[in-house]
Amino acid sequence: MTQLQPKPVKFDWLTLMLYYVFVVAGLLCIYASVYKETNPMIYDNSMNYGKQLVWIGISFFVGLMILLIDEKFFYAFAYGLYGIAIVMLISVFALGTEIKGSSSWIRVGGIQFQPAEIAKFATALALSKYLSGYNIQFKERKTQMICAAMILIPMVIILLQNETGSALVFVAFALVLYREGLPGWLLLVGISIGILSVVALLVKPLYIIIVLVILAVSFLLMVRRTMLLIYLTVGIIAFASAYVSSVDYVFENVLQAHQKSRINVLLGKEVDMKGAGYNVQQSKIAIGSGGLLGKGFLEGTQNKFRFVPEQSTDFIFCTIGEEYGFAGSFLFIALYMLLLWRLLFMAERQRYKFNRIYGYSVVSILFFHFTINVGMTLGLMPVIGIPLPYFSYGGSALLSFTVLLFIFIRLDANRMNELTSGAD
Amino acid sequence: MDNKIRQKILFIAFCLVALVYVIRLLQLQIVDDSYFRSAQENVLQEQTIYPARGLIYDRNGELLVYNDAVYDLSVIPIEVKTLDTALFCKVLGISPEQFRYKFEKLKRQKGYAPYKKCIFDRQISIPVYAAFQEHLYDFRGFYVDVRTDRKYAHSNAAHIMGYISEVTDRDIENSNGYYQMGDFKGMSGVERSYEKELGGIKGIKYILVDSKARTQGRYKNGEYDTPSVSGKNINLSLDYKLQALGEELMQNKIGSVVAIEPATGEILAMVSTPSYDPNLFVGRDRGKHYMELLLDPAKPLFNRTIAAPYPPGSIFKILMALTGQQEHVLTPATTYGCSRGYLFVGCHAHGSPLPLRGGIAVSCNSYFCQVYRSVVNNPAYKLREDAYKSFRKHITSFGLGSKLGVDLYGEGSGLVPTSEFYDKIYGRYRWQALTTISLGIGQGELGITPLQMANATAAVANRGYYITPHIVKKIDSKLNPNPDFNKKHWSTIDTSYFQVVIDGMQDVVEHGTAYIAKIPGIEICGKTGTAQNPHGKDHSIFFAFAPKNKPKIAIAVVVENAGFGATYAAPIASLMMEEYLNKKHDTRKALYERMIKADLTHKNTNDTAATKTR
């Protein structure tokens, strides 16, 4: 061993610690959300927390294995893994089992998993490897196209499997590309389009256009006018107006009823206590009833008596909010931010571009999950079924998030000897 | 360097999201407490614990009213998802139209909410209940609740006991949140006036329910629960046997009997006929029966004893005799002659002239017209109206002309006209004794309820005072705490004036107009009354008390349109006094039989009267 791997290895203990804290806290929350006073057994295979316990064991073991693997393995097998992931994604169409309206699951023996989970870190690895390759300049059109393709291929396949949430996660790679040189205005345009879309659904397009024109005119009156600026402004306004109108059109004519309803509920235009609105309303009630300090472990009534659907999976944050209150929720968010900060910090300290890009992928994916999932329980984001990493119940999700994170910890652990061995 | 900035920008973006979420959490968890309340509403279900209603006994401990289990069918509409309507209707024995109608009606009810339990059908029969239990699994969302309803051991004293009924919307509004839809409360009789004692206090049990409304246990181990307080048992002052006899004697007659224990004011019997079986107000057909009784032209729901004003007729002469003496215009020795009447008031044949005692014994009309005249035209008063006011003061001091305050709902005040009343009719200073002479013999505008008559008798029996008549003797085995029921209301007549009047009343029974009422061995003092009225034949009225010394019962009987006071009222009173004092009523079989058989409801004469007016 020493002969093969003589370099000192230094794992980032803070990240590891946060991981274990999250997993244990998550287990407690899952236990609380499936807890029944009549049968308070901790180890019970038929119950979710029992299963989760098994999966945690598996995840810890796999995580340990990853830490023991040579870091070059991931670089070497990045494309291979990506290929396998794509093949698995496609094979879902043939072998898939339908669970809860989504046909994205593969069942092998007694266990079932979503290839989409594997696709996340496989895509992260492949993208990292591609962008860190020799002579690859992100500014080149070809590079950009290939990157886009690498992200979009799994995304589209997953979308076809009716797993919108998982597909949207791939949007997170935009942040990685931003770090690697994607122009900031593109992100801004993306975000602006997002905001415009929401506003277009809330207000009549005509009003938005009027406001935009007023804004543009006052902007032009205030600055030193050049022809270019005028053309640019007019162009932007024209584009925005066209976009706003088309969003309205698409919403009214293309989207299906249940999609419209979900969006309407999110925007507060419709109160639907039976369907999409029920989850969010109950989720807000559960969290809101927590107060400052919460009701205490296993004391959350909303939680115990199943008022929030999908509480152990997508709505696990309700358990935190209800049983630990504002204090617990704040601590949770702070710790999550700490993890994200730490990962950003770690990513920036990498010598290898591959490691850095992978690190950013991890941060982006975790951030995206956090934003959507917590935002959804707070009624700030649409109800998109994606798990809260390390907390939500779900074996294959936990395992894939573990793999995602531990690969980066493994890569980071080698940063010391990169100094000595120089660039490969 | 650019990359470092981008790292920072990204982290700032992360922090912004986190900040937004923290603000949102602040709003949800700290600022807005509506979520906390919603959570409570989600899991907390208030269950009402209904207390057992108090039982009602008579004065001797005879059980009159008790509780019986009934089964109500209730439904939580939101839980009804897959219902085999055809099977459901078959089990319940209703048509699908009725089923739909019931559901529609339910939805229009006040306070309806799909997740709230509400009563679908009341008091289903035991066989239906059994059939339903078998199918309870098929009928998700439906529940059978056990509740208690009143049962009456006897069919007597319906007016006294009253009935309970579902609270109205107005009751709910006025109850400060105590009553809820579907609760029952006393609507008449003792059930109403002692609702607080009989009804007990509802308890509340907080239970936790899950999202499927399944019970998950007590809330905080019942810390916030309030236990229910059972209703108190009540002993009526009523003597059940006397009451039953009274109702038997009064069957097929319209009228009233009120018997009071003079020393205590306790009502021993209170009969108002026609009456009804109180058990009609129990069960599914309660509403139907109620409407039938309400529309009955004989008004069986009307409690005549406390609400119907009658002209008292000659029994009023007793009060005239007392008033005359008090006003010093009459002495026991005063004699008046009678030539079969006084002015336009007629009289029957009897010896003449007569002193006071004799005048009472033969019930001489002209004697008391002259007493009345001397009272109202009393020269001691400058103004007639002052003399009249004084007369009225004496009369009303026996409890006439205003509500006595009996513990029953619906008491009427009767009428003793005021001087202003006559001013209005005749003009001030334009009337005097002769104008209102019929008052002297208990006719004219006088309106006295049977309860007031009995109470006045009790006051005479007590030689000057009465205790507010009441029907409830004991609450929870303790004497009725109402201070009014323990207080002597003294009349304005001096005790010394009573003796001659009472002697006269004894003569009435011994050898006067009511000798038919005589019971060997008991000194009865009574007075007959034959009240003319605009509704037909004279009312037969009698009031009496016995024994003469230390009276134990004072009784007033009114039989509508039955003729002379001695014909029906006196025998009925006599039989009842015998029952109460001697515990038997069959010594005078023929009289008893005659009373029971007499049918004086005048169903046919009413018809002829109707044709006449047409």
Image (spheres, grey):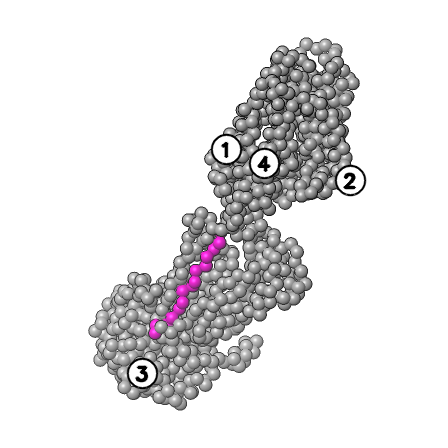
Q: Residues within 10 Å of mark 2 (few under 14, many from 20)?
A: few
- Looking at the rendered structure, whether the residues under marks 4 and 1 are on a common chain is answered as yes
Chain holding disc 4? A
N-terminal of the pair, mark 4 or mark 1, is 4
Q: Residue at x 43, y 60 (%)?
A: B51
Chain holding disc 2? A
Q: Residue at x 57, y 41 (%)?
A: A49
Residue that carries the numbered disc 3 in the rendered image: B582
Chain holding disc 1? A
Q: Which residues are magenta?
A: B45-60
Look at discs 4 and 1 and give the one toward the viewer: 4
Q: Residue furthest left?
A: B496
**What kind of residue is marked 3?**
Asn
Judge from the rendering whether residue B21 lies leftward or rightward of residue B161; answer left or right. Answer: right
Judge from the rendering whether residue A58 lies leftward or rightward of residue B545; answer left or right. Answer: right
The residue nearer to you, when weighing A309 against B16, is A309
SS at mark 3? helix
Residue that carries the numbered disc 2 in the rendered image: A94
